[in-house]
Image (cartoon, rainbow, N blue to C red):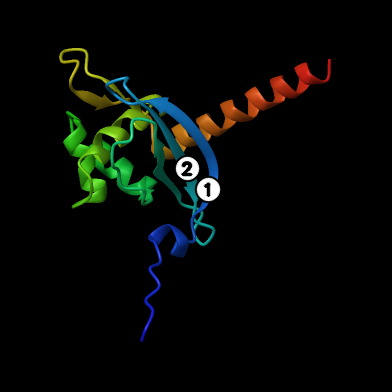
Amino acid sequence: MEIENEVTEAELSPIETIHTGECQSLSGQSSLTYAIGRNPEDQSLHLRIVANSGGGMFCDEWASGVDIDDLVQSHLVLISRSMCELHAGRSINTGGFVLAILKHLGLVRVNAENSRHHEMVPDTTFERVAMDAMDQADKRKTIKSKKANI
């Protein structure tokens, strides 16, 4: 009798988590935890959803920062379904959750003419907003550390 071991992509992935954060879903009904990771082989940045407090299903696979930039830059109007291209054939919730994270990070913003549509923030990239998020987290840690030592 042969025993099959099921190995997830996350277990095989060389991508290392370098930052985790939280934000609200687009509906505001749940809190999302996300991770930013770096591939040690080529130093590329990636994004994945780690948890959803609302219990809805989602794809937890890494999305390349380059693919995120390509997708965001190629659409004048972004909706949840636009983001599904990053994880084709996976849970439909994933697109909305990724859009919420990218909004939180500052890569996209709500379209001024239609609140259901989003658009890329000019002159931004996934790498830039990811690095900004990590810098802000470092600053918060430093402030907390200083307050604890007072």
Q: Is residue 60 above or below residue 107?
A: below
Q: Amino acid at mark 2?
A: Ile
Q: Is residue 25 above or below residue 94?
A: above
Q: Amino acid at mark 1?
A: Thr
Image coords of residue 126 (percent x, y): 40, 38
Image coords of residue 43 (percent x, y): 51, 54
Image coords of residue 12 (percent x, y): 45, 65
Name the mark on residue 9.
Answer: none
Q: Which residue is mark 2?
A: 36
Quarter of the picture containing the N terminus is: bottom left
**Given contact means CB atoms under 8 Å apart, are the residues at marks 2 and 1 in contact?**
yes
Name the mark on residue 17.
Answer: 1
Residue 76 lies in what quarter of the image?
top left
Quarter of the picture containing the C terminus is: top right
Label located before the other in sequence (2 or 1):
1
Q: CA distance from mark 2 to mark 1?
A: 6 Å
Label 1 CA crowd tier, 10 Å (few <14, some 14–19, many 20+): some
Q: For numbered disc 2, what is the local secondary structure?
A: strand
Residue at 37% in and 31% down = 101
Seen from the viewer's position, the closer of residues 22 and 109 is 22
Image coords of residue 13 (percent x, y): 45, 61
Left or right, 149 with reference to 17? right
Residue at 44% in and 38% down = 34
Q: Is residue 14 above or below residue 98?
A: below
Residue 102 lies in what quarter of the image?
top left
